[in-house]
Image: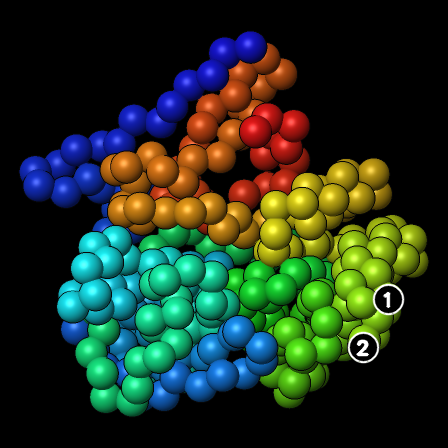
Amino acid sequence: MFITLPHPIFRGNIYAMPNDRLSSTYDLHTVILSNEAVAEAHYLLRCECPEIAQHARPGQFVHVMVSHDTGMLLRRPFTIYTVDGREITMLYQIIGEGTQRLSEMLEGEPIQVLGPLGNTFDFTTRPEPAILVGGGAGIASLMLLAVALRKNDIHTLGLVGAQHHDRLLSVKDLEAIDIEVHVATDDGSIGHHGYVTDILTDLLENTASQGPTVYACGPHAMLSAVAEITADFEVPTQIAMENRMGCAMGVCLGCVCPVRIDTNTIEYQRVCTEGPVFNATDIAWDVS
């Protein structure tokens, strides 16, 4: 088996993304408009980033400098959750020092936001229906897509998984745009007692022949299970990967994931530039 790494394209003092995506990428100084807890250990941050809001597409993300004063030199990646005029929101989970510090920041405090970054979900082939599968904070990567699907009058189902009731996210936001929501929790505190992939299997047994497309984001184990299930039903599936990132510009290669080019070749592609959205069948799930 051959394994290759992608080669960044060097132009002057920057590494350029494929298809000249940097031409619509902006590094903006802004301030927090609101930063509110929406579930246990999860926050929704709102800020004004007009250029990013104008160009953001479903699945894309931003890279945020939390604070120059903390000694944390690396930015943190966050999916663009919603766009409203000149404003964007980010739905995030407290995981480490950076997100803990961000959760403590108040209205009016400055942040620096780079984006929009990455590629996008595709629904040019109209899904019937579209099935969104979000595990934990992974549902954040699907909200812009949900809005776009409903604007195009595409029947959409939302499958939302969480550890327990207090960590359940986005259900009201999805229902507000007329999406049929199905909930699963690990402990059974609300909805189906078990994994969100259990609901996916049941749904595909009834809809696989209609021409659905599945769009998913969440923990790696969940995404691997989604890929296996949808392969069995021969349903096209797009996933948004959430690998750790350093630069988010394709330079550091810290976010690569294994992608099958053919039967005998795996290429480690960058989630920040070639992704974050991939076809589920392209990911080499059996390669660590």
The quarter in which the N terminus is drawn is top right
Q: What residue is at 34 percent from the left and 63 percent from the top?
A: 98
The quarter in which the C terminus is drawn is top right
Residue occupying the far top of the picture:
1
Give the x, y percent position of residue 160. Answer: 70, 68
Q: Amino acid at mark 2?
A: Ile
Numbered tag placed on residue 190 in the rendering: 2
119 left or right, relative to 122:
left
Comparing 126 with 31, the one in front is 31
202 left or right, relative to 80:
right
Q: What residue is at 81 percent from the left and 77 percent from the top?
A: 190
CA distance for labels 1 and 2: 7 Å
Q: Amino acid at mark 1?
A: His
Choose top left, top right, bottom left or bottom right for residue 161: bottom right
> How would you rate the neighbour count of disc 2 (Cα within 10 Å): few for under 14, some for 14-19, many for 20 or more?
some
Residue ID for mark 1: 193
